Amino acid sequence: MERFSHRARRAAGIAAAAVAEATWPTRCAVCDLPGAVLCVSCEARLSYVDWWRACPVCGAPFGRVQCSECNPVTLGHLGRDAFPFAGCASAVMFDDDSGRIVRTFKDQGERRLAEPMARIMVRALPPNWEFDAVSYIPASERARRERGFDHGADLGRAVAAQTGRPLRPLLAPPRTKDQRGLSRTERLGNLEGRFSALPRARTGGRVLVVDDVFTTGATLCAATDALAACGCTVYGLTFARA
Ligand SMILES: [Zn+2]
Ligand SMILES: [Zn+2]
């Protein structure tokens, strides 16, 4: 009886998935063709950041020789004279296509995108980075309630699985307003210092912190401050770079 009900439940689950697939077929987040959440040709056509031309410190796409971000003006906006992390890299430029992927993932709740996004991100990891664990920028409580999931945790979990490192949630969710619709200055004010490290961060170590988009760097800076205070060395890895 027990066995039968288990099998029946599983069959019902498969049937429900088949109905869902027939009613709302899986579609590419970029071109809308049915088949995969990100089709092969759209994945190949993304605007990849060329690691050899990027800034080795902050990952700015053409900053290898002279970085447009690691300068007194940009860092002054952040109230700093240097980025606090050991390095940051991003996989693709933020444009219409990568923006569509991020929105479909976060706002439309297509959580299966975490896997291809993580795969693309892991390819952008500089070969000389050494880290022991993967962590992530957690969604705010409000965003998590509205979306029903923590997009940061999904991305962190997928990157951890693909790098073979353990996933360690080290940051408490920020208590902030939604970043969208805020100006650059408001975003900085909204985020600065809003992260606190969870007690388990006190063991320190080298941590890869993942996030979906690097915009001003304020988020990663604030997260790094909280983790560095616990003795962690932080590397940042984002899917897109604004
Ligand atoms: Zn496509
Ligand atoms: Zn830089």
Image (tube, helix red, strand yellow):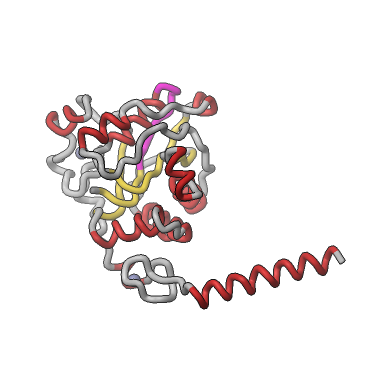
Q: Is residue 202 above or below residue 176?
A: above
Q: Who's the residue at 51% across and 44% down the image?
A: 165
Residue 177 appears in the figure: yes
Residue 131 appears in the figure: no
On the image, the x and y values in percent for residue 6 come to 77, 65
Q: In which quarter of the image is the N terminus?
A: bottom right
Q: Nearer the viewer, residue 232 or 2?
A: 2
Task: Describe residue 151's horizontal placement relative to residue 41 as left or right.
Answer: right
Q: What stretch is highlighted in magenta?
A: 229-236
Q: Who's the residue at 45% across and 34% down the image?
A: 173
On the image, the x and y values in percent for residue 188 come to 26, 32
The furthest residue to the top:
229
On the image, the x and y values in percent for residue 217 come to 27, 37
**Is residue 20 found inside the magenta-colored segment of the image?**
no
Task: Describe residue 139's horizontal placement relative to residue 51 as left or right.
Answer: right
The furthest residue to the right:
1
| Magenta stretch: dominant secondary structure | strand
Q: Who's the residue at 47% across and 57% down the image?
A: 111
Q: Who's the residue at 16% across and 48% down the image?
A: 62
The image quadrant in which ligand 1 is located: bottom left
**Is residue 232 found inside the magenta-colored segment of the image?**
yes
Q: Nearer the viewer, residue 27 or 88?
A: 27
Q: Which of 110 and 119 is in front in this view?
A: 110
Q: Image quadrant of residue 219? A: top left
Q: In this view, does 135 lie above or below 81?
A: below
Q: Image quadrant of residue 19? A: bottom right
Tally the numbered discs.
0
On the image, the x and y values in percent for residue 184 come to 21, 37
Q: Is residue 131 above or below residue 118?
A: above
